[in-house]
Image (cartoon, rainbow, N blue to C red):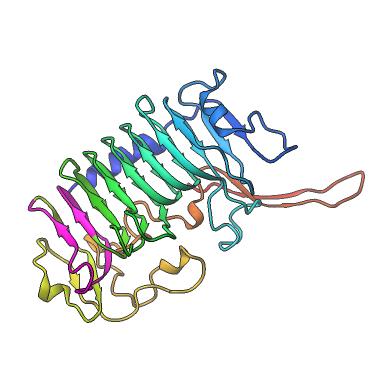
């Protein structure tokens, strides 16, 4: 299995040195170097590998096509439902971002997106809330994201690139379309994800995941598909509609648990906090080397609200009047 790939590639991207940081804020009257995200991405003032910090706003940011390596960081999501993480509880939202040829080496984190398309290689998609994600480049990392498709009629994650790493993501079910779909061109590692819908796997090493699928003879039938080059290790499989994984599939691999009874999650709290494993969950310790299965297990556990791996202020207190103003600031590193 490719656990060494997970560690090495992740370290290369997450530990990258950021260059100049530019503020982007589209709220009228707020001080920022840019008030338009697309302008910031194309500005001659911004150099390759610079960082754009996008402030939370009640207004949508403009759609963006990125043609050079940049780091884009937003504040996170579900901030009003996971208290104590940010002082500003508003997300930074964009309908569409496209990483085009030339943007290899980019990273995006902490953003709320309707559509994210990656046509470049070596792009990191980390800690975002995304409706739909398409990966066409090779050597891409998709890590600690919350995939949220409210329309439920299209594929949530589509992959056509080689040597991917997709780990610690929540991926919901889709009534029409697939939760995860890869092509014959795709290959990589799929680890510690929670998937609640249909899947097509090719050339994949799948481990420490939790799968819950609905079997419906009247509409789709069985749509959990994989080729001979895909292996499954130490995953938890749960079915619905009185259908049995163990009886009706021939999954190859070791350490998998089928048709497990009992509650898996705490099943309360925020949309992402809901999927923390409850005490006694059969997914606890069921992964490789006794790791937990699901998004909060493994080498890089999911972070609530997709808080980016940079310091953030989560509380700021100051009196309204006075000549000597005592100010209290609380911050955390979020590594």
Left or right, 266 with reference to 89: left
Q: Residue furthest right?
A: 323
Q: Is residue 212 above or below residue 47?
A: below
Q: Nearer the viewer, residue 208 or 91?
A: 91
Left or right, 230 with reference to 28: left
Is residue 270 magenta-colored? no
Q: Nearer the viewer, residue 111 or 182?
A: 182
Measuring 22% from the left and 81% from the top, which residue is drawn there? 242
On the image, the x and y values in percent for residue 99 come to: 39, 33
On the image, the x and y values in percent for residue 117 come to: 37, 40
Measuring 34% from the left and 60% from the top, which residue is drawn there? 297
Q: Is residue 10 above or below residue 314?
A: above
Q: Nearer the viewer, residue 52 or 28?
A: 28
Left or right, 18 with reference to 213: right
The count of marks equals 0
Q: Residue furthest top?
A: 44
Can the viewer see residue 233?
A: no
Can the viewer see residue 242?
A: yes
Q: Nearer the viewer, residue 120 or 234?
A: 120
On the image, the x and y values in percent for residue 155 come to: 32, 54
- The quadrant holding residue 240 is bottom left
Highlighted magenta segment, given as a residue range: 199-228
């Amino acid at each position: 299995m490719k656990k060494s790939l997970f560690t090495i590639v992740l370290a290369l991207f997450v530990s990258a040195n950021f260059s100049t940081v530019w503020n982007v804020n589209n709220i009228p009257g707020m001080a920022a170097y840019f008030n338009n995200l697309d302008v910031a991405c194309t500005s001659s003032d911004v150099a390759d590998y610079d960082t754009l910090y996008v402030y939370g706003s009640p207004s949508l940011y403009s759609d963006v096509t990125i043609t050079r390596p940049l780091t884009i960081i937003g504040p996170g999501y579900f901030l009003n439902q996971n208290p104590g993480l940010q002082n500003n509880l508003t997300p930074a939202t964009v309908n569409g971002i496209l990483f085009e040829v030339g943007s290899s080496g980019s990273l995006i984190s902490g953003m709320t997106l309707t559509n994210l398309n990656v046509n470049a290689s070596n792009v990191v998609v980390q800690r975002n809330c995304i409706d739909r994600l398409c990966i066409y480049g090779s050597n891409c990392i998709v890590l600690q994201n919350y995939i949220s498709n409210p329309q439920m009629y299209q594929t949530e994650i589509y992959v056509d690139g080689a040597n991917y790493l997709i780990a610690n993501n929540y991926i919901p079910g889709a009534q029409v379309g697939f939760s995860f779909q890869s092509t014959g061109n795709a290959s990589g590692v799929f680890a510690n994800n929670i998937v609640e819908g249909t899947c097509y796997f090719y050339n994949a090493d799948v481990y420490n995941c939790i799968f819950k699928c609905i079997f419906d003879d009247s509409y789709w039938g069985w749509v959990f598909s994989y080729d001979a080059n895909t292996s499954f290790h130490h995953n938890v499989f749960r079915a619905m509609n009185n259908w049995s994984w163990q009886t009706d599939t021939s999954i190859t691999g070791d350490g998998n648990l089928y048709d497990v009874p009992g509650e898996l999650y705490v099943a309360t709290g925020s949309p992402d906090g809901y999927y923390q494993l409850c005490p006694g969950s059969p997914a606890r310790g069921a992964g490789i080397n006794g790791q937990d299965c699901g998004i909060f297990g493994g080498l890089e556990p999911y972070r609530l609200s997709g808080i980016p791996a940079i310091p953030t202020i989560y509380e700021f207190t100051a009196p309204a009047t006075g000549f000597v103003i005592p100010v209290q600031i609380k911050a955390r590193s979020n590594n």
